[in-house]
Amino acid sequence: MAESRRLLSVNSEGKIRILRIIARMNLGGPAIQISGLMRSLNDEVFEQILLTGTCDQDEIDYLDEQNLHLPVTRVPELGRRVRIVDDVVAFMKIRKVMKDFQPHIVHTHTAKAGLLGRLASMSTFDNHIRVHTFHGHLLHGYFNKPFTKLVTLMERVLAFRTQSLVAVGEQVQRQLVAAGIGTSQKFSVISPGLEISTLPQRVDAARELGISSEGFTVVWAGRVVPIKAPHRIVEIAEKIRDTNLPVRFLVAGDGPLLKDIADQSRKLSLPIHFLGWQSEIERVLAVSDVMILTSENEGTPVALIQAQMAGIPVISTNVGSAEEVFSDQESGFLCKYSASSFAENIRKLLENPVLFKSMSQKAVQNSRKFHLSRLVSDHENLYLRIMNRANA
């Protein structure tokens, strides 16, 4: 608070106004982080507005689902997809909000909001401090090479005009800097911070989900999209079935690939239950024994953090900052993807109760560094630091 008082003596206007922008608050890591910051940042020092668009029909809007009463300005034209006319309208509306709110800090999250938000800020010629958080990046696995080069070039230019950059993990930062996007001096690494509620009883959670509470259960949670490589669930389940291990799989999520994967599962008669989007992750965790992440690219996977908070060992591909989320061979297994390697690690946890208990305990211990209070503290310190620097 000493730092807060020092800043307020410099800033005669009172509270530090933060305009936070994200294209959509779909259920996932960025929405969880942003809602935590909006609820928990010191309101004696900071005034915040969240500017966001709308979710696609196959997505859950986290704000609506959680019934969060936050200071939100909706821009319907702002969303995931690139639509030139809508994007121009969104740009103008963002610019108007900036003119009305007069933020000290414009903090953008994820790629599209980062582009429109920072361009709008620059176009006002007001003295905003621009901060952008990379919750991951689009440098691998999303686009073809020419378009990836264009995205990289745009991010380089935007980074040059952004006072502070935030990465959710060390590996994400290293990859961005290696691509010429910002410098290590301009970056801060702020890993996710979150909370989960007390888990319900396994029997109760299973009943609410419409499944049995029995059986060793492996869960996969996320958007069912190509970058998450959900087809690998089928490959792993098939490999497990061939070993005759009593394991079932849950898929908690939705997306354009869901139907194809569900069709494959039915054709192969695999023990995979498709739960759709689940707004209460605690209910899913309560019936799960192991969580797997099969992605080809990630930022810092929030689902793995949630699993560890529930004492659930994890198995993940070595992508993004996954290696920073859990300890390989201690609270889970980090490996290059193959159905055989995932199946083997699942077998180890199923057949070795001592190993399972040890990894479960390590998971809970490891998750403590990802609590919401630390995320809030890191952001408050960042904002105070850059404001003091600007006012020096």
Image (cartoon, rainbow, N blue to C red):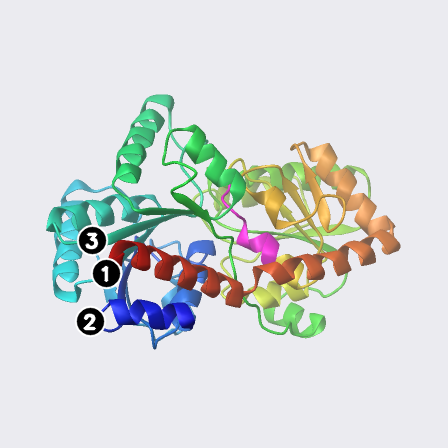
Determine the CA span between mark 3 and mark 1: 25 Å
Q: 369 or 269, which is in the foreground?
A: 369
Residue nearest the observer in this picture, 159 or 127:
127
Q: In this view, does 209 lie to the left or right of 224?
A: right
Among numbered discs 3 and 2, the one appearing first in the sequence: 2
In which quadrant will I find the N terminus? Answer: bottom left
Point 53% across, 42% down: residue: 170
Q: Quadrant of residue 70?
A: bottom left
Residue 251, compared with residue 174, is above or below; it is below
Marker count (numbered):
3
* Spot occupied by residue 69 in the image (x, y as percentages of width and height): 34, 76
Point out the stretch of residues depicted in magenta.
Answer: 298-306
Residue on which the image places disc 2 = 13
Q: Name the front one of labels 3 and 1.
A: 1
The local secondary structure at tag 1 comes to loop
Which label's residue is closer to the chain start, 1 or 2? 2
- Quarter occupied by the C terminus: bottom left
Q: Distance between the residues labelled 1 and 2?
A: 10 Å
Tell me the SS state at disc 3: loop
Question: Disc 3 designates what residue?
Answer: 77
Depicted 377 relative to depicted 182: above or below: below
Q: Which mark is in front, 3 or 2?
A: 2
Q: Do the residues labelled 3 and 1 touch (CB within 8 Å)?
A: no
Seen in the image, is 10 located left or right of residue 252? left
Evaluate whether residue 270 shows in this view: yes
x and y percentages locating residue 183 in the rendered image: 39, 36
Q: Which amino acid does label 3 sit on?
A: Glu
Observer able to see residue 266: no
Q: Within the image, what quadrant is residue 136 found in?
A: top left
